Amino acid sequence: MSAQTERRIIGDDYNHATDGEYKKLRDMAHKEYERRKELSQKSQQAYKSGDGAGAKQLSEEAKKHGEKMDQYNRQAAEYVFRENNTDSAHDEIDLHGLYVEEAEEFLGQRIQAAMQRGDPVVKAIVGKGLHSAGGVAKIKPAVEKLCNQHRLRHHIDPKNSGVMIIELPNGPQQPGQVYQQPGPQQQPHYQQQQHQNNYQGQGNQYHQQQQQGQGKNDNLLVNILCFCINKFLK
């Protein structure tokens, strides 16, 4: 882990909680949220009173404020991500200051890029929940859920509970840690052929295993890409 990352974790480096630009963008997004909520309620009231045209107009105005809210939140997310990750190592990603869906999107993109580079792991700085409401961590369980969803082995860094190490299937694996897609387990193919001494057959088997492993990685990349696209379109 880089020295820059260690400083961020213990709070000696950039802190989004005290960043004026970040707070301004989030505050603007919140104001748009409140305005959207207010107009949506008025739209429902107008509809119930029989004013369909007025309800539609109010609903359209609410939608515009919702779009502005998304724009400000997107600007805030990109800003805080850039500030947090400018000096990060290529296998690290700092998710501080991001909302859950934002963190999932950025992490999904980083995992996809890391797999294409052939990196063995991604180190996600998920924090300890110190800045979350009530001190309850939100990013960490969301990252765990994402990893479980895509069958990615992961564990908390024993040296720091604010860092989650995500193991990628194309990296070096420990015995018993090979990435697997969901599905029923089958007997190893080599057991079915242990009495066959045909060299060509063994070569074909090895080639098939390589193709299967590559196929699993390709499927994972596609799944993560679709996950990121869905997050972006929400």
Image (cartoon, rainbow, N blue to C red):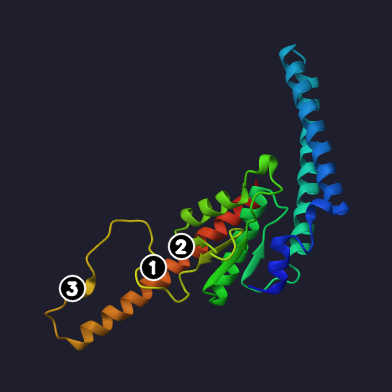
Three-letter amino acid code at the position of disc 2: Arg
Q: What is the CA distance from the residue labelled 1 to the residue labelled 2?
A: 8 Å
C-beta proximity under 8 Å, tags 1 and 2: yes
Report whether 141 appears left or right of 57.
left
Residue under numbered circle 3: 191
Query: What x and y, as percent, mark residue 234?
Result: 65, 46
Residue drawn at (70%, 71%), measured in percent from left and top? Answer: 88
Dot 3 falls on a residue whose secondary structure is helix
First-in-chain label (2 vs 3): 2
Three-letter amino acid code at the position of disc 3: Gln
Q: Residue furthest left?
A: 195
Closer to us: 221 or 20: 20
First-in-chain label (1 vs 3): 1
Residue under numbered circle 2: 153
Residue under numbered circle 1: 177
In the rendered image, is residue 64 in sight?
no
Query: What x and y, as percent, mark residue 180?
Result: 38, 63
Three-letter amino acid code at the position of disc 1: Gln
Dot 2 falls on a residue whose secondary structure is loop
Dot 1 falls on a residue whose secondary structure is loop
In the rendered image, is residue 7 in sight?
yes
